[in-house]
Image: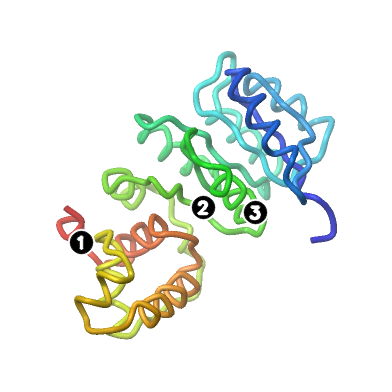
Amino acid sequence: MNHDIRLVIADDHEIFRDGLALMLSRQPNIALVGQAGNGRELLEILNEVEADVIMTDLKMPLMDGISATRALLQKDPAAKIIALSMFDEEELIVEMLEAGAKGYLLKNADKQEIIEAITSVYDDNIFYCRQTSAKLASMIVKSRFNPCRDAAPVTFTDREKEIIRLICQQFTAQEIGDKIFLSKRTVEGHRTRILEKMNVKNTAGVVVFALKNNLISEAELL
């Protein structure tokens, strides 16, 4: 990385925004270059500063995060945007991804996940929040959002497909190993290769990829 990741945050809740800004200001390789209280302010700030990653709330006064995302991507199709969401905003998360966001976080995400999301999106990866529900994963799969559209086809061995289904069903590496008679370490090795092949960072990404590519059915997630 030649320079710190330049970050702009937009959220109308000042206490949340200030807390997030304080936490990120202490992180190496991340430079907070702007804060906005709504979508209009976000667009104005981005006329003045360059940002590598933008984090924006979905619901804001004057202009919401979805409208701001559409406007930003119309001006700069390469903009890297992460949605900040509450638990009960599945429809808005899907709309945000369809608008062009590269990922989303729930507002109660921990520091490690927030940093992982920023660095992942900066590196041109899609980031799915770890707390993605089966319902939201299904909604994403049925939406127009398809990050795999232009990706090269990926093939999995029968063993990998078996492990993918078990990962999607929320089994731990130890539990998977017990079920298919492999050591925990061997399962973890398989899991690492699966994530690399899918170009995802966590179980939520595996679930979305697996559903999108018919490696598991919705019924198997219930």
Q: For the point 39% across and 59% down, which residue is it?
A: 203
Circles 3 and 1: CB atoms closer than 8 Å: no
What is the secondary structure assignment of the residue under circle 3? helix
What is the secondary structure assignment of the residue under circle 2? loop
Q: Badge 1: how crowded within 10 Å, few (<14), some, or many (20+)?
A: some
Circles 3 and 2: CB atoms closer than 8 Å: no
- Tally of numbered discs: 3
Residue 220 versus residue 45 in the image, above or below: below
Residue nearest the observer in this picture, 99 or 31: 31
Residue nearest the observer in this picture, 38 or 20: 20
Q: Position of residue 118 (x, y in %)?
A: 63, 48
Q: Position of residue 205 (x, y in %)?
A: 42, 58
The amino acid beneath tag 2 is Phe
The amino acid beneath tag 3 is Thr
Residue 77 versus residue 57 in the image, above or below: below
Residue, disc 1: 217
Colouring scheme applied when the structure was drawn: rainbow
Q: Position of residue 39 (x, y in %)?
A: 63, 23
Task: Give how far apart the Cα atoms at labels 3 and 1 are.
Answer: 31 Å
- The numbered dot on residue 119 is 3
- Left/right placement of residue 4 relative to residue 138 reads right
The answer to which of marks 1 and 2 sits earlier in the sequence is 2
Residue nearest the observer in this picture, 129 or 103: 129
**Quadrant housing residue 174:** bottom left
Residue, disc 2: 127
Q: For the point 78% across and 42% down, which residue is it?
A: 31
Q: Position of residue 70 (x, y in %)?
A: 58, 35
Q: For the point 47% across and 32% down, which residue is it?
A: 85
Question: Which of the two marks, 3 or 1, is nearer to us in this view?
Answer: 3
The answer to which of marks 3 and 1 sits earlier in the sequence is 3
